Amino acid sequence: MKKIKMYLATICVCIGAIVNLKAQAENEGIFIINDKDGYTNIRESPDGKAKIIGKAYKHQLLFRDDDGYEYDEDGVIEYEWQKNWIPVYNNSVRGYIYKKNTLGISKLSSLDRGFSDTIIRAYNDSVEVIMKIVAFDPIIDKKRLTDKKILGESTHNVISDPNTILGEIEINYKWGKTIITKHKLQNYYLAVWWMEVSIGQDGELYIHFAGGQGRNNISYDAWIVIFNAKIVQEILSPFT
């Protein structure tokens, strides 16, 4: 039995390393706003005089829109505007933002991590984030599915017999202890098995996690942004 546990632990470490490399590559296409005004405009085209079609605010994630580039058989076609602009989408808005008003999330500092069967922990000297994994309740949890989407059983989110679910997130930080239960989240997240936490310039927390019980290694990839003990954003990554 001890050999089996050691073998499984080795597998988890290897998978975690692979996912971490994948996440690092994906994070290069994720940005936060770095503008003294607290927001930046999203424009219809990569031009400072182009129509403003939306705004992106501090403490919210923006994802690079690779469809905003043009391609040929050699890859992305290089244009002059790419030196100063990034094609992005923010919720349903697709457009362009000025590069100098952004900061890549990969530039932020990340917390150390620890894992067990029921807890995923990220921490440093000033903050601790704990994801508590609990048993999926086939009665209570399924009753609440009328107003929540369940993620992780498969790429089609088909419920069969899920075993575990993200029960709560506990945060111990400068604002005190914060408990975010699964009922406060927009979605139900099955079988969470990986998490990474980054700290922003204002002390906001970017909680990045993945999980799933489907055939694919990662059935979903999600982010929760916390600032002053409140959820600022809960969003699924387009890289899922």
Image: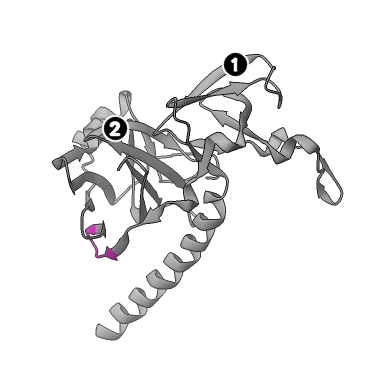
In the image, 135: left or right of 13?
left
Single out the residue that lies furthest toward the front: 36
The earlier-in-sequence mark between 2 and 1 is 1
Q: Is residue 64 visible?
A: no
Query: SS at mark 2?
Result: strand
Q: Amino acid at mark 2?
A: Ile
Percent x, y of residue 81: 75, 34
- Residue contact between numbered discs 2 and 1, judged by CB atoms under 8 Å: no
Single out the residue that lies furthest toward the left: 176
Q: Quadrant of the N terminus?
A: bottom left
- Give me the residue at 58% from left, 37% from top: 100
- Give me the residue at 17% from left, 45% from top: 174
In the image, 95: left or right of 206?
right
Determine whether 96 is above or below 205 in the image. above
Percent x, y of residue 153: 41, 46
Q: Nearer the viewer, residue 161 or 15?
A: 15
Magenta span of residues: 114-119
- Give me the residue at 40% from left, 41% from top: 223
Percent x, y of residue 113: 30, 63
Instruction: Give the numbered dot on residue 53.
Output: 1
Q: CA distance from mark 2 to mark 1?
A: 25 Å
Percent x, y of residue 12: 38, 69
Q: Is residue 232 visible?
A: yes
Q: What residue is shown with label 2?
A: 231
Location of residue 97 by image quarter: top right
Q: Nearer the viewer, residue 34 or 205?
A: 34
Instruction: Give the numbered dot on residue 160.
Output: none
In the image, 178: left or right of 13?
left
- Give me the residue at 51% from left, 26% from top: 91
Q: Amino acid at mark 1?
A: Ile
Comparing labels 2 and 1, the label whose residue is closer to the camera:
1
